[in-house]
Image (cartoon, helix red, strand yellow):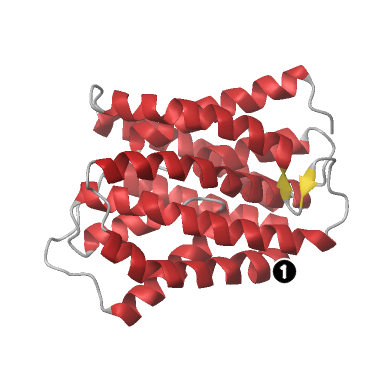
């Protein structure tokens, strides 16, 4: 699979869009990237099962880069709750490795596509309704946060997302201020991505039919182009968030997510 000019343009456009949306709406780019990378790899001859797995792995790998720039911005504003990061991170790493090394490697790409579709559909509904949690709970103890981190890491690894769609609602449900929850979720994105990427690389060593430029399940050409473009546009999205009606934009974006979820569901059911 050579990196021809049209492919570079497709990946660059995807990176620009995903980065901007990540900054604008506080979401990881995985929700957008996975369906499109699946489409790009599928149309270039990869088996459907393999295309889904590579899309999820490559999407997660880009979060290694976008999370660093995001965390720096949030940390400068003093918004990251590092006390929560320290308690959730061990569980996040364990859950991520269990997901990426074990379940991800064993599950067929079609089942992963269906799981992704259901998860994105649920996330889109939450975004569309803009539900607010009851402000009466607190973060659980160390054991509870270890378990919560495990669930966040595990699900993130199976859908190729940075975990924000699980960790932000969880933290706000536990009465963490919204801006702190978003910032803390961004900080958790790095250990989630690091542990999952390690799992995808190791699990992919025994995979067959991988295209040229693959490192385990990660497709390096796509990773480089998308990462460069998304890191560039994420700050622009964050700046635009202060000038645009984000609540309305979230509902529009939720509608787009339904379409992407429907595509992945069709991909999974037809595989």
Give the number of callouts. 1
Residue drawn at 57 percent across, 30 percent down: 228
The image shows residue 51, relative to residue 169, as above or below, that is: above
List x then y, in percent, for residue 150: 46, 71
Q: Is residue 19 above or below residue 47?
A: above
**Which residue is identified by label 1?**
106
**Residue at x 59%, y 72% (from the top left corner):** 98
Q: Position of residue 229 (x, y in %)?
A: 55, 27
Relative vertical location of residue 133 with respect to residue 232 in this rendering, above or below:
below
* Residue 251 visible in this rendered orientation of the protein: no
Residue 212 located left or right of residue 266: right
Q: Which residue lies at the image location 38% right of the left edge and 29% below the top edge?
A: 235
Label 1 Cα crowd, 10 Å radius (few <14 / some 14-19 / many 20+) = few
The kind of secondary structure element at disc 1 is helix
Image quarter of the N terminus: top right
In terms of depth relative to the viewer, which is nearer, 16 or 48?
A: 16
Q: Is residue 53 left or right of residue 186?
A: right
Quarter where residue 205 is shown? bottom right
Residue extending furthest toward the bottom: 143
The residue most toward the right is 209
Q: Quadrant of residue 221?
A: top right
User: Which residue reaches farthest left?
Assistant: 136
Whole-percent x, y for residue 83 in the image: 27, 65
Q: Quadrant of residue 37?
A: top right
Q: Nearer the viewer, residue 47 or 162?
A: 162
Residue 191 lies, in percent from the top left, at 48, 59
Quick check: can you spot residue 221? Answer: yes
Q: Residue at x 82, y 46 (%)?
A: 47
Left or right of 45? Residue 126 is: left
């Amino acid at each position: 699979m050579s990196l021809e000019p049209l492919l570079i343009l497709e990946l660059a456009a995807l990176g620009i869009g995903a980065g901007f949306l990540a900054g604008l709406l506080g979401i990881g780019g995985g929700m957008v990237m996975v369906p499109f990378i699946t489409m790009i790899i599928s149309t270039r001859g990869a088996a459907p099962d393999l295309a889904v797995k590579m899309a999820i792995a490559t999407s997660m790998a880009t979060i290694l880069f976008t999370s660093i720039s995001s965390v720096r911005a949030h940390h400068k504003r003093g918004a990251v709750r590092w006390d929560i990061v320290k308690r959730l991170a061990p569980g996040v790493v364990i859950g991520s490795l269990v997901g990426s090394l074990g379940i991800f490697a064993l599950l067929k790409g079609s089942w992963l596509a269906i799981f992704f579709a259901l998860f994105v559909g649920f996330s889109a509904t939450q975004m569309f309704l803009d539900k607010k949690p009851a402000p009466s709970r607190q973060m659980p103890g160390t054991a509870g946060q270890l378990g919560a981190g495990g669930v966040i890491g595990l699900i993130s690894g199976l859908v190729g997302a940075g975990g924000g769609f699980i960790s932000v609602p969880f933290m706000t449900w536990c009465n963490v201020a919204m801006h702190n929850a978003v910032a803390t979720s961004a900080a958790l994105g790095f250990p989630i991505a690091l542990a999952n990427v390690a799992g995808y690389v190791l699990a992919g060593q025994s995979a067959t039919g991988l295209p040229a430029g693959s490192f385990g399940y990660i497709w390096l050409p796509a990773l480089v182009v998308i990462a460069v473009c998304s890191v560039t546009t994420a700050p622009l999205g964050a700046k635009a968030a202060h000038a645009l009606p984000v609540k309305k934009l979230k509902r529009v974006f939720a509608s787009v997510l339904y379409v992407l979820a429907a595509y992945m569901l069709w991909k999974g059911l037809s595989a």
